[in-house]
Amino acid sequence: MSDFFTIEWQDGAVVMLDQRLLPTREVYRTYRDYRGVARAIKEMVIRGAPAIGVAAAMGIALGARQLKKIDRPEEFDRLCQVFAATRPTAVNLFWAIERMRAVYTRTRAQGREALCAHLEHAARKLRDEDIAANRRLGRYGTTLIPQGATVLTHCNAGALATAGYGTALGVIRAAWEQGKKITVVVPETRPFLQGARLTAWELMKDCIPVTLITDNMVGHFMQKGQIDCVVVGTDRTAANGDVANKIGTYTTAVLAARHQVPFYVAAPTSSIDLTCATGALIPIEERAAREVTHVLRQQIAPTGIRVANPAFDVTPHELVSAIVTEKGIARDPFGQTLVQLVKGGQKEKGEKAKREKGEEGW
Ligand code: MRU
């Protein structure tokens, strides 16, 4: 059980851990104005696909209280637009906005108080559902992790990237909780350093053995046979199984294929976009040049240098060994298996028993 939280609704405000300051400072920020929440998503106070979905939902619940005319759909639309404009790649954000829009449409006739209460309830529910989904996903994923394996993950798809427990780190946590003596290798993840700052911090807090490497060491360790499998998260997985995730994921997948290392993607169904046929259609966020020219506050490149900074890349489905969701595990042909999972789902053995043991309360 970790001693931090990523995002919570507390006394009519949204509270989140400022991830820009980790690992050296643990500071929680409180937002009472929806514009602050939108800025926090843009500026990476909170990041990670499921986490920004929850933040947007809570931001919309806050914003609804600030609307002048609650019964005007155009006003509610403008509020949703503020969140839709924060970050383009993670589909969870848009998925969460659509869920909130549906609640608005269903309950707006009930008046301001009831509507705001419904929106708040929906946002909190979305958070709880995310944690429960990650736990289920983790249990499916752990079947892929051998006893004693060295697992490489990229970026941070952990508790910090979700409402809790994590997706890729959920698989790793579940394996650890089952007593598998695993070790995790985490590349630092330039330019924003989610691996070094966040994943290393999270895993150390849970006492899961972790080794930090730089991004350009991945090939070396695979060539030496020191990586048994890769598990990463995703910001958006297309209907054909192409996976958009943090920049550098594609490079890792190519290396994994070259060295016959299984490459797994932990993808809650909220991050699967069946309306997006292939990865080529996924919008890739371009972030500020300063993230590349500077490491933290230190300038490391000449002033005025031209910079490219795509935040994500797309791994083609041929390089993906399996996609783990909270409803089961999909394998090629992903075009069929993903639809089956998103719309139906496999039965998880012993799931009811585990729920009864209270394991959902991360
Ligand atoms: O730019 P970020 O830090 O929001 O990118 C996060 C990632 O790429 C994660 O791997 C992805 O969102 C999955 S999180 C469960």
Image (cartoon, rainbow, N blue to C red):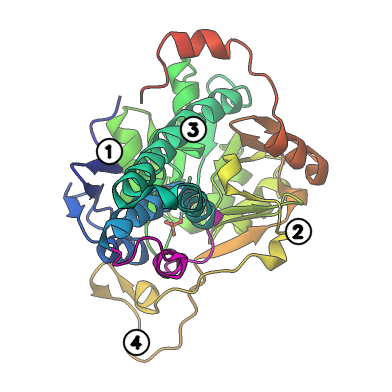
Circle 4 residue: 302
Instruction: Report if residue 184 is visible in the image.
Output: no
Circle 2 residue: 277
Eye-nearest disc, 3 or 4: 3
Residue 5, disc: 1
The N terminus, quarter of image: top left
Q: What stretch is highlighted in magenta?
A: 67-91
* Cα–Cα span, label 3 and label 1: 15 Å
Who's the residue at 45% across and 52% down the image?
A: 104
* Cα–Cα span, label 2 and label 1: 35 Å
* Cα–Cα span, label 4 and label 2: 41 Å
Amino acid type of the residue that numbered disc 2 sits on in the rendered structure: Ala
Who's the residue at 52% across and 7% down the image?
A: 353
- Please tell me whether residue 165 is drawn above or below residue 59 in the rendered image: above
Question: Badge 2 local density, few (<14 within 10 Å), some, or many (20+)?
Answer: some
Relative depth, front residue between 32 and 133: 32
Task: Indicate the position of residue 254 as horizontal and vertical percent values.
Answer: 68, 54
Relative depth, front residue between 100 and 240: 100
Residue 134, disc: 3
Task: Indicate the position of residue 219 as horizontal and vertical percent values.
Answer: 59, 52
Mark toward the start of the polypeptide (3 vs 1)? 1
Is 151 positioned to the left or the right of 56 in the image? Answer: right
Mark toward the start of the polypeptide (3 vs 4)? 3
Relative depth, front residue between 197 and 352: 352
Q: Is mark 4 on a helix, strand or loop?
A: loop
Mark toward the start of the polypeptide (1 vs 4)? 1
The C terminus, quarter of image: top left
* Cα–Cα span, label 3 and label 4: 43 Å
Who's the residue at 41% across and 43% down the image?
A: 162
